[in-house]
Image (tube, coloured by chain):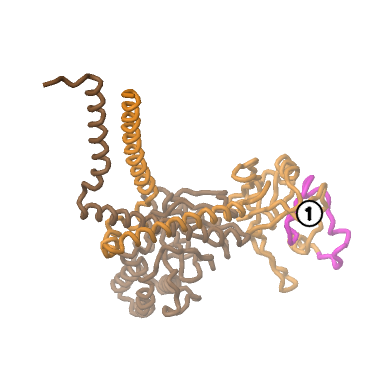
Chain colours: A orange, B brown
Amino acid sequence: MKNVGFRIIRAGLLLSLGGAAAFLAAGWLRTSIESRTLPPRLVPEVSALAAAAAAVPTADLDAALADLEKDVNRLEKHLFSLDRQLMRRAPKGTYIVIDAAHNKLWLRRGEKTLRESICSTGSGKILADPAGGRSWIFSTPRGEFHVTNRLEVPTWRKPDWAFIEEGEPVPDRSDALERFQDGVLGEYALAFGDGFLIHGTLYTRLLGKSVTHGCVRLGPIDLKAIYDQSQLYTPIYIF
Amino acid sequence: MRAIPSRRRQVLTGLSVFLLLSTLATVAPRGQTDAEDEQDRRSRYARLLQRKFLLEREAQLKELQIHLAEQDSPYLVFDLEEKEIRVYVRVTAVQALPLTGAEMEVLTEAEDAISPQRAWMDRALDLVAKSGDQEAAEIIQPRPEGAAAMDEINPRSVTAEIAGLKETTYPSRYTLLYRQGVAVHIVGDQTALKEGGWVQEKLERLANLLIPPDLPAADEMEPVHTWIHLTMSEEQARAIYPMTFVGMRAMVRLPGDPVF
């Protein structure tokens, strides 16, 4: 009987000690989480906010604290929802990113770069038609696009500016035979709207330079890799 | 006096320790004075307020990013905390350029600081006065009114669309001019400032920078306008400038902002 009594006392003692330790640990944890996430400058210092805290009447302090805790909980839930919304907007699957300023092209999936290539993009030069009021700016468009067509052994249909640039007469008909040229776009082409293509080039020594009429040129090995890993609607982001 | 049996002594000792600790556990927190307890609660209130402020800012940044990610175009993040300029597609950073140490001067409008455009204005007026150019002084003179109106701007909500790109001689070689009165000036060369040889053209450009053509009248402005000046090396300015394009949007992570 004595043993039982002693055991009860010992258990009570241990429970008291455990409870006290848990109470202290919870307090420390709560303080450390709050302190760790406080930004250094933009958020006012605690000392600056102390004035606001001091202004709360003592009688209202508990209620004010409860309200504040509710606000913080609500904001934490809101942030969780925003994180989910952001995740939904992340690029899906494989996508292509082109840095037209530095003539770089990346094939990416999520946060991962699958392939980095040197490309050539628009020169930014302006060509005016001496016969009329037309002019062209040879810039690669910037923004978000997607692959609208995939072509193997593409044929180039020369636009008017290609004839004007070479000082040749522009054919009247858009389907005139002299407009069609084989072998200049490489083995593959990915169209991304308004006649712009990612294609190959005969002038691989110019890769890395801004020399094109707006299309994006790649070397043959990179072109095949990008072609193989892309499909219709693969997103293309150009900046 | 009769000796207490050893077993009973053990029990009594245990009981005494238990009672002592129980008393301590219950009395210790109450051992504080009411004033100390209230002080603790007020400190907790201040800390919670700070936490709320941080969460609100984080939510604001994320909402801005969601808005930008929906624009179907790459956008820039001027990260003044990490000292980086990053290009994002949707919510993914695909390119980052560092803004290194002493080469970067950040002048953001802080609530307790003189607004940078006001400081600019003072500096410009000083130089104009020294140049003795009356016509130039007339051009620049009306500006403080607009600048003063922007003193109350809250710099914490900055998002903008690049409305135009300018190559200027003062105050920056490259300027991304934003709508809504937000401009990010990438200063690559400050020789014009050092020369002090003011010419009409420079002043006109300065005026354009201070008051962009499509900036609404001061009384119509919403409290989201600010001016942020990044001073960096010529090399960095050259690298960043071509990565921007008309219509490109941007957001700014200010020093002390949370990660988003």
Q: On the image, which quarter does residue A85 sit in?
A: bottom right
Give the overall secondary structure of the magenta segment.
loop
Residue type (three-letter) at the residue carrying disc 1: Asn
Left or right of A65 on screen, residue B201: right
Is any atom of residue A80 visible in this view? yes
Q: Nearer the viewer, residue A235 or B120?
A: A235
Q: Name the spot of residue A102 as percent of width and height, x first.
A: 58, 50
**B144 on left or right of A171:** left
Residue B166 drawn above or below residue A33: below
**SS of the residue at dot 1?**
strand
Q: Residue at x 27, y 38 (%)?
A: B22
Q: Nearer the viewer, residue A64 or A52?
A: A64
The image position of residue A191, as x and y in percent, is 75, 54
Q: Quadrant of residue A70?
A: bottom left
Q: Is residue A95 visible?
A: no
**Quarter of the image with the N terminus of chain B in it:** top left
Q: Is residue A226 above or below residue B53?
A: above
Is residue A174 shown in magenta?
A: yes
Q: Does B132 appear above or below B108?
A: below
| Residue located beneath label 1 in the image | A149
Which percent across, then down, holds residue A67?
39, 61
Q: Position of residue A144 (x, y in %)?
A: 65, 58
Which residues make up the magenta segment?
Answer: A169-197
Asked whether A182 or A106 is in front, the reply is A106
Label 1: chain letter: A
Name the one closer to the observer, A80 or B207.
Answer: A80
Q: Is residue A171 magenta?
A: yes
Does A128 sit above or below residue A102? below
Q: How many numbered marks does the figure carry?
A: 1
The crowd level at tag 1 (other Cα within 10 Å; few <14, some 14-19, many 20+) is some
